[in-house]
Image: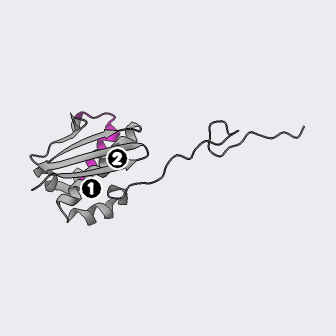
Amino acid sequence: MNLIHVSGKRKKAVARATLKPGNGTVRVNKKLLDIIMPPLARLKMREPLILAGSAADKVNISVNVHGGGSMSQAEAARLAIAKALAMHDKKLRPVFLEYDRNMLVADVRRKEPKKPNSHGKARSKTQKSYR
């Protein structure tokens, strides 16, 4: 079996995952998945591994993620892990799509740029006074 390289994106976060034969170890930025904080981000990254079941125990996954906030990084890593597992085992693709489409398809929404006279928001404008 060859190495599998995939990437996942969420907002400004970009994750690159490498899957290779192994014993089920998952590392994110060279740290074991079990020590990643916050715990909610750890659970998000573990979702595809739980759905994959025994297929995830036969491979090692190394994820390198940068940019964005902690939850965006977690969602980008989740996408990359799920894509890698789906490429490794074709039977997992329908399982991931049925559970959550965002496991295999990137969320393309971005932050709307700030407009002039808008107090740091994209749409709210300065209140107008007639007196």
The answer to whether residue 44 shows anywhere in this view is no
Give the class, few, some or many, for how many residues have Cα within 10 Å of label 2's Cα (few <14, many ≥20): many
* Residues rendered magenta in the picture: 35-48
Q: Kindly identify which residue carries mark 2.
A: 76
For the C terminus, the quadrant is top right
Decide if residue 13 is on the left or right side of residue 128: left
| Residue 51, x across and y down, in percent | 23, 56
| Residue 46, x across and y down, in percent | 26, 46
Residue name at image x 40 percent, y 47 percent: 10
Residue name at image x 23 percent, y 54 percent: 84
**Above/below status of 20 relative to 37:** below
**Above/below status of 125 relative to 101:** above
Q: Residue type at mark 1?
A: Lys
Residue name at image x 20 percent, y 65 percent: 91
Decide if residue 50 is on the left or right side of residue 68: left
Q: Residue type at mark 2?
A: Ala
Q: Kindly identify which residue carries mark 1.
A: 83
Tag 2 secondary structure: helix
